[in-house]
Image (cartoon, rainbow, N blue to C red):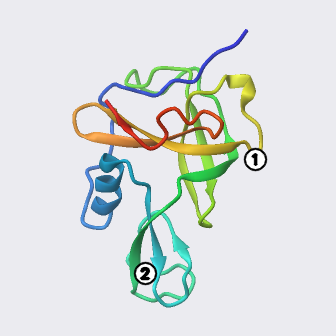
Amino acid sequence: MSIKLLPQYADLPHAVPGPLTAPFWAGCARGELLYQRCGRCAAATFPPAEHCRECLAVDQRWERGSGHGVLYSWTVVWRPVTPAFTPPYAPAIVTLDEGYQMVSNVIGADVDQLRLNLPLKVTFRAVGNELHLPYFEPADQLSNSTEVSS
C-alpha cells in the first residue's frame, strides 16, 4: 500500500522568530533557503548563530542556498504528540549541497520511497497565518520546488 507524505497546513506550534533567525524566516516567505557562511573561514553555519562554529569569528554572512541535498536520516510519525500535526509525516535530517544539515520534513514521496541519500529539493509551504516552512521533496519532482505555496 502506497502512502504519500503531505505537508502540514494547520497553525503549528513554533518559536517566534528573533533577530538572529528573522532573515532565515523572511527568506522562506520569499521562497529562498538561506544559511550563514563565515566571512573568515567560509564554513557553512546552520542553524543561525552569532559566531562561526569552526573558527569562532563573528563574521556570519547570509547566503542563498541551492535547496538541493540528500536524505541523511528520517523517521515516519504515525501518532503525533499534539493534534496540530496530521500523520503520517516524516521529520528528516537533510544534508545540503552547501555543507550543512538541517531538520525538516519530507513531502511528496511515498513512505516506502524514503532511503538513505535520496536526492531532495526544497519547496516552501505556508503553514497557518504567518509561517512558511521549508520542506523537501524528491528531486525528480520539481513541480513547485522554488515557489511559495499557500
Tell us which disc is closer to us: 2 or 1.
Answer: 1
The answer to which of 38 and 97 lies nearer the viewer is 97
* Location of residue 80 in the rendering, given as x and y in whole percent from the top left corner: 50, 25
Q: Which quadrant of the figure has residue 98?
A: bottom right
Residue 103 placement (x, y as % from top left): 54, 49
Q: Quadrant of the C terminus?
A: top left
Relative to 74, is 63 on the left or the right?
Answer: left
The residue under label 2 is 51
Horizontal placement of 31 versus 71: left or right? Answer: left
Asked whether the viewer can see residue 125, the reply is yes
Contact (Cβ within 8 Å) of mark 2 with mark 1 = no
Q: Is residue 88 left or right of residue 16?
A: right
Q: Which mark is residue 117?
A: 1
Q: Could you tell me which residue is drawn at 39 percent across and 42 percent down?
A: 133
Q: Amino acid at mark 2?
A: His
Near-viewer residue (28 or 103): 28
Q: Amino acid at mark 1?
A: Asn
Q: Secondary structure at mark 2?
A: loop
Residue 41: % across, % down: 55, 88
Q: CA–CA distance between discs 2 and 1?
A: 30 Å
Tell me: residue 23, above or below residue 92. Answer: below
The picture places residue 124, in percent across and down from the top left corner, at 41, 40
Residue at figure coordinates x 63%, y 40% from the top left: 139
Residue drawn at point x = 53 percent, y = 57 percent: 66
**Residue situated in front as seen by the camera: 99 or 66:** 66
To which quarter of the image does residue 23 belong?
bottom left
Q: Residue furthest top?
A: 1
78 shown above or below 20: above
